[in-house]
Amino acid sequence: MFQSRTRSAPLFSVAIYLYQPGDGGLDRVAILLANHLLDRGVRVELWMARTDGPTAHLIDPALTVRQVPAPQGRRRLAMIAQFPALAAMVRRHRPDILYSAGNQSNMLVALAALGTKTHAVSRISNPIVRPGQQGLTAATRLARFRAIARMSAMTIVMGAHDRDLLAGSGPVRLLPRPTVTPSMEVERTTRRPRDPGTPCRLLMVGRLAPQKDQATALAALARLPHLNWRLTIVGQGPLLVDLQAQCERLGIADRVTFSGFICDPHALAALMGQADLLLQPSRWEGLCATLIEALACGAGVVATDSTPNIRAILAAAGQHPVVPVGDADAFGRAIERSLVRPAAPAQLGAAVRDHRVDLALDRYVGAFASLAGRVEARALPSPVFP
C-alpha cells in the first residue's frame, strides 16, 4: 500500500516504458522509479504493453498507466510490432523524457523518440558483452549497444565496466541500483546468529531459466554431503520440472524446497534475513538485484563471474571472490569456505549503502531533471516503500 501525499507542481514529464509488470528486477525498479517520480512532483506515466503481472500490485494507484497496443506472441516480436503505436503515443503526449526499463526495449524507445523533442533514456540491465562471448558475436553486440547509446539522450549503466565500454557513444551516467529498502535493513540489524546445531540456511532467488543456472549450484551442493545444509529456491519458470528431477538424481531432493515466486517484498526480505548464504550461479547479469538485497539483509553471497559490476561490491562486503561461470567444483568450494568465514552483517550493509532505494531514486530524479533542462526536484518527505 502507498500513502497518499501532497505533491508539488510538475517539474517535467516522464513516460516510463515497461513491457509488463513481470517478476524480474528491472520490472520492480521501473515501478519504484515511477512511484518515486510521482512523489517528487514529476508528471509521470507508465506505458505498458501488458498491464497485468506479478509486480502490478506495487504500482501506486495514483499513477497514470497507459497501454501501448501490441499483438499477442513472443515479447521480442510484439515489441517490434508495437513501434508505430509507441511512436504515435510519443507524438501525442509529448513527454520530456521517454525512459526504457531495460535492454530489450532500449532500441524501441530510442527509435520512437527520434525526430521529436522527447529525450530517450536507455538503461543497461544486462551485460553489454556476456561472459564468454568473443569474436564477431561480442563485437556485434557491443556495436549494437553503442549505436543505441548514440541515439539516446542518456544511457544509464550500473557499473564502471559498462560505462567504459560505452565511452564516446553519447552521454552515459553511472547510477546505483534502487534496491535496498528499510525492511531489508531491519532484517540485517535484527538477525540472530544461527544455532550451531541447526542446518546451514541457503537460498536461491530468480527465474527458473537458463540464465540463472540453478543447475550448477545444485551440482555444487551435491558435492557437499558432509555439510548440514538446507536450500530454498524462490522463483518460477520453465526449468522447474528439470531442476526437481536433477535434485532427485543427485540425491538431494530432501534438502531442497521449491517455494515458487514470492511477490511480497517483506516476505522475501524476511527469508533473506534468515539465510546464511545466497547462491547466485547466473551465467550473466547486469547488476544482480538479489545479490544486493541479500547483503542488505545480512546474508553472505557466493556468486559466479556473471558481470564485472559485482566484483567491487563483493570485495567491499568481504565475500568470496567470484567463481567461473558453470564451474560446480569451484562453486562448491566457495560455499564451504564462505560458511566457515562469514563477514559481519555491518560490513555487508555498508557495501550496498549507495543502493538504498530513496537515495538511488533521487539520483535518477536529478539525472532526469538535468536532462530536461529544468531545476532539480525540490526535496520532499521520503516516500514509504515496501
Image: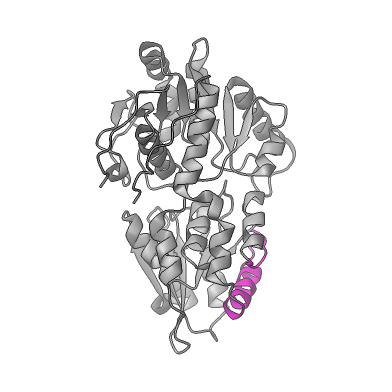
- Residue 305 in the image: x percent, y percent? 65, 56
361 in the magenta segment: no
- The quarter holding residue 57 reads top left
The reply to whether residue 182 is in sight is yes
- Residue 124 in the image: x percent, y percent? 56, 37
**Residue drawn at point x = 53 percent, y = 58 percent:** 213
- Residue 3 in the image: x percent, y percent? 26, 43
Residue placed farthest to the bottom in the image? Answer: 197
**Residue drawn at point x = 47 percent, y = 40 percent:** 361
Q: Nearer the viewer, residue 105 or 220?
A: 105
Residue placed farthest to the right in the image? Answer: 135
335 in the magenta segment: yes
151 vs 2, left or right, is right
- Asked if residue 183 is positioned above or below residue 32 in the image, the reply reads below
Number of marks drawn: 0
- Asked if residue 328 is positioned above or below residue 183 in the image, the reply reads below
- Residue 148 in the image: x percent, y percent? 60, 25
Q: How is the image coloured?
A: one colour
> Which region of the structure is painted magenta?
318-341
The reply to whether residue 245 is in sight is no
258 vs 336, left or right, is left
Q: Nearer the viewer, residue 34 or 22?
A: 34
